Every structure is written in structure tokens, then in C-alpha cells.
Image: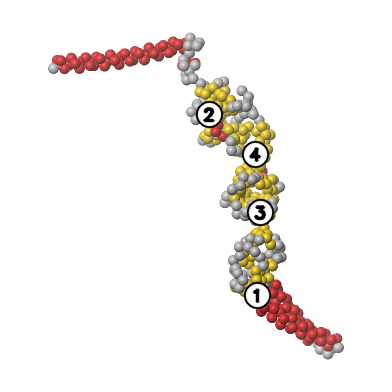
Amino acid sequence: MKIKYIVYAILIIGFASLVYYRISQNKAQKEMGGGRGGAGGPGKGPGGKGGGMPPMRVNGVVLQPQPFASKLAVTGSIEANEQVEIRSEISGLVRSISFEEGSSVSKGQVLLKIDDAELRAQIAQAQTKQSLAAENERRANLLLKKEAISQEEYDVARADLKSAQAQTQLIQAQLAKTSIRAPFSGRIGLRAISVGGYLTPQTVVANLVNMNPVKISFSVPEKYSNQVKVNTPINFTVAGSGKVYTATVYAIEPGIEAATRTLQLRARAENPDGTLLPGSFANIELPLSVVENALLVPSEAIIPIQGGKKVFVTENGKAKEVKIETSTRTEKDVLVTAGLAAGDTVLTTGIMTLKAGSPVKVKIAAGQPK
């Protein structure tokens, strides 16, 4: 039993000696580090003053005032200048079709003809009655002058003539509706009827579209409503084409849409070759205003915080937090309206690990003053 206790005692003494040795070594190392930095010369700690960390290497940009054309990127829809579904006002059999699907037609051109045999018979009958009424009115007028009939009898004859004339005009109007004409010039689409088919006012014959010019309808957020004006030129692109088209704003809705809090605008663009198709989406670039001495900060330098945004700038070799206010955003930059001044160096890398007061060594972007 004594041997067992002796072994335990030796193990405990050995473990205590090892712990004491490690504590002594750590204390000695700390004292040596403090001694190197105490003189204040090249023997300072690894991080510089007081044994701090070395400066963090970061990139930055020096803010320079520059002209900035504020632009708003929105999406819109291309619409036809004029578009209508061709329908008939009366019912009847289609006797002829005078257009080719997908072709261009002129205003007033006859597109199709409805059978008018019955109406022609009615117009002949109405014209005969009108001629008879006109003769009766002429005779009654002669008799009235001779005082052979009363004024009342003449008025009846004249009323019969007027009624006959009205009936003739009514049938003529119905007869004119048997010829369906293009209300404006444009391109006609696919027809939905054939010769011999029975046409009703509910049947759509085809779509007629005027695509030169085209209209571009789009909306802007309410906060930009006082910056948009009629006759403002815009640029836009469509899917599947790298071409940049131009248009001009010609109409603005007089009020804000309450449901979306947006303002509706409409622009007009020339389309002589018909490449812009109604119904297509348009990516629109709308110019708003020009700022002469704008300060633009790279978007990656901005950190969202509660109640606003902030950036890090360098001051006396250390990082400094600055709260900023911003306006328009582009693909790469953000327009800063408050918080920064020309000449400030804004840090663009390492910002998520930086803290206020951290030493930094800044590498200025190429082409900027150092």
C-alpha cells in the first residue's frame, strides 16, 4: 500500500512541476515581448505601437467631383400605335375576302363582302315607294295652291314622302355595312373566317395593327414623378436584339396609381421596318437630371446599417466609420448626397472585417491621385 501512495505522490509532484514550468515560460515570453516594445524604436511589437496588429491591407478610391447624368432603369411594354379587331356590324354569308393574311392594307380598303342580295331587293322596293310618295307630294302641292285640298292633307302627303326617304336611307346604310373596310392603314393578321361562312357581329374576322410608330408604356416610382417631363428622349432595348432604340415621351398620366404608387408614362418610337412587335418587353433607360459635382462611391463599399448606410474612410492611417445618405444607383456606383466630401478616401475591400480605429494600409485604385 505504501508503494501505491508513493507512486501517486510522484505523479502529482510531476504534474505540478509541469504546470509550474509552463506558467513560468509563458510569463517569461510576455516579459520579453514587452521589453522589446518598451524602448519605442524598431523594437516595437509586431503590430507597431503597444504590440498591436499590423496594418490591414485594403483597396480604396479617392472621391472626385464629376458630372453625373442620373438615369432610371425600368421595364415597359411595346404597344401598337393603333390596334383593332375587325368585326361585322351585321350578320350574313361571306361572299368574298379581299385581303391576304399578314399583308399591309390601306385605310378604306374593302376587306371582305357580305351577301347583300336581300338588301338590294329592299332598297329597290324602298326607292319605288319613295318615287310614288314624291309624286303624291307634288300633286298635293299643286292642289294646295289651287285651294283644292286643305293644308292638313298636303302635310300628310309630305310626311309620307319624308318617311319613304328615311326608309331608303336606312336600307342604304345597312347595304354599306355589307362591305367591311379597313378603319386605318396597317398590317392585318390571320383571318378566322372563310368564303361561304356565316358572319355575326360576335365573330372576329382578323386583327388590324398599325406598328409605325409604336408606343412604349412604362411606369416610374412616385418619388421620381417630379423629374419626368414630356418630350424627354429615352433609350430602350428588346429581348433578342442588341440594338438600342430611341423614343420620346409624349404623354404622362395626370395622377399617381394608388395601388402601385407609380406614375404611368407613354413614349413613341419610329418603327419603319416593323422589327418592334407589339406585346414585347422593353428595357428602358430614362434620364432624370444632371448633377455637376457628383460624388460617386462604388456600391461594394457601402454597408447597410439600421437606419441608413455607412462606409469606411481612412484618416491618419486608421479606418473611420462615416454614415452617408445616397440617391440614385447605377450598375457600379451609388450617388452620395451627404456624409462625404471631395478628397475622402473610401475603402472598398475588407470592410466587413474592419472596425473603427483599425490601422490600414490603402492601395489606391489605378488612375487615381494618391
Dot 2 crowding, Cα within 10 Å, few <14, some 14–19, many 20+: some
Q: Which mark is residue 168?
A: none
Front residue of this view, candidates 215 and 249? 215
In the figure, residue 113 lies in which quadrant? bottom right
Judging by the rendered image, the residue that carries numbered circle 2 is 349
Position of residue 267 measured from the top left corner of the image (x, y, whole percent): 67, 50
The first of marks 1 and 2 along the sequence is 1
Q: Which mark is residue 115?
A: 1
Judging by the rendered image, the residue that carries numbered circle 3 is 274
The amino acid sitting under disc 4 is Ser
C-alpha separation, residue under disc 1 versus residue under disc 3:
35 Å
Placement of the N terminus among the 4 image quadrants? top left
Dot 3 crowding, Cα within 10 Å, few <14, some 14–19, many 20+: some
Using the image, determine if residue 291 lies above or below residue 5.
below
SS assignment at label 4: strand
In this rendering, does residue 262 appear at all? no
Count of number-bearing discs: 4
Q: Nearer the viewer, mark 2 or mark 3?
A: 3
Dot 1 crowding, Cα within 10 Å, few <14, some 14–19, many 20+: some
Position of residue 307 measured from the top left corner of the image (x, y, whole percent): 53, 36
Judging by the rendered image, the residue that carries numbered circle 4 is 70
